[in-house]
Amino acid sequence: MRLDGKVAVITGAASGIGFGLAKQAASRGMNLVLADVEESALRDARTQLSENGATALAFPTDVRQAAEVEALATAAFDEFGSVDLLCNNAGVNLTVSRPVWEFSLADWEWVTGVNMWGVIHGLQAFLPRMMEQTAKSHILNTSSSAGLISGPGLAIYKLTKHAILSLSETMYHDLKGADSQVGVSVFCPGLVNTRIRDASRNRPAPLGVERPRSTEQEVVEKMLRESSGLSGPEAAEIALTSVESGRFYIFTDPSTVESAHQRLTGIEAGVPPSAGATFTAPPGTETPSSNE
């Protein structure tokens, strides 16, 4: 699919992979609709892109709220008349090495609200309108390498990313069966340098704060902050180039496929899941990435 001169809507667009997607889309001459819950960062992103010649609309959006995503869709179609690329990208995370029983109900509500319901709300608001368009369009759902692995930690994050992977696969079949002009890809990045370790900056006050971390968990978090990985624009370029070439599964790290293969081998054998990536050791190829 050609993206040059088309219209892109990007959630989580003020930082990380989202801002990378915006920069790479702008380099293709795309008109941009930028959505993010962090309003000051969103304004800064729009200003930076506009100063470099991009046409960009900034629309503050909490993707947990269906009405706000619906308003985003209305604004995008009113401004540009069509949407050619929807990037359901906004995402958050919590302490990587925290076991499942240490999460609060508020933790579950916040992470699933952004990572999973944010994608659902995006589809509800945009997909019917995109299906009415006569030209080809595309939806890019950001999952993660964590959506393909098993192992300790990351319970809520993994749940949401596995869900996005499955949803994207089902969408592919549904859209193909409907002979739709809308395509879909699922982006499963590995380690990317973003601000996901600081995602709590955007946590709604009514949902409280995450429980204090242990000394061991703080060590892991510090290690992750200092880890090297792709930049947001580098990861985004892989994603958009893959969309242009018609790729469905998109990875930034080939080892993600090997991790998925190991998991499938265990499924075939009927044995308990292997530890896969552990987040108490130095980060490796399967460290989760940020979206927002």
Image (cartoon, grey):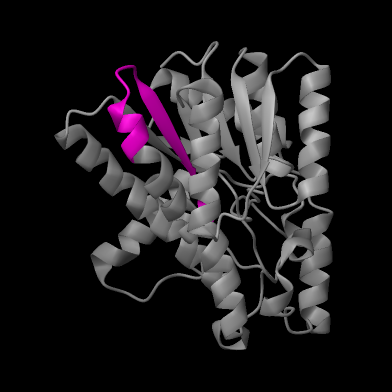
Q: Eyeballing the image, is 104 above or below 4?
A: below
Q: x, y (%) of residue 62?
A: 62, 55
Residue, x 45% and y 53% (percent of image)?
A: 121
- Farthest residue, direction front: 78
Q: x, y (%) of residue 56?
A: 68, 25
Image quarter of the N terminus: top left
Does the magenta portion include 133?
Answer: yes
Q: 17 and 9: which one is in front?
A: 9
Tell me, yes or no, if residue 143 can be seen here.
no
Query: Which span of residues is magenta-colored?
Result: 128-146
In the visual, does 186 lie left or right of 269?
right
Tell me, yes or no, if residue 257 can be seen here.
yes
Residue, x 55% and y 11% (percent of image)?
A: 5
Q: Eyeballing the image, is 284 above or below 101?
A: above
Q: 62 and 23: which one is in front?
A: 62
Residue, x 45% and y 19% (percent of image)?
A: 244
Residue, x 79% and y 63% (percent of image)?
A: 201
- Farthest residue, direction bottom: 101
The total of numbered circles placed on residues is 0
In the visual, does 157 lie left or right of 260?
right
Does the magenta portion include 230?
Answer: no
Q: Eyeballing the image, is 208 above or below 261?
A: below
Q: Quadrant of residue 214?
A: bottom right
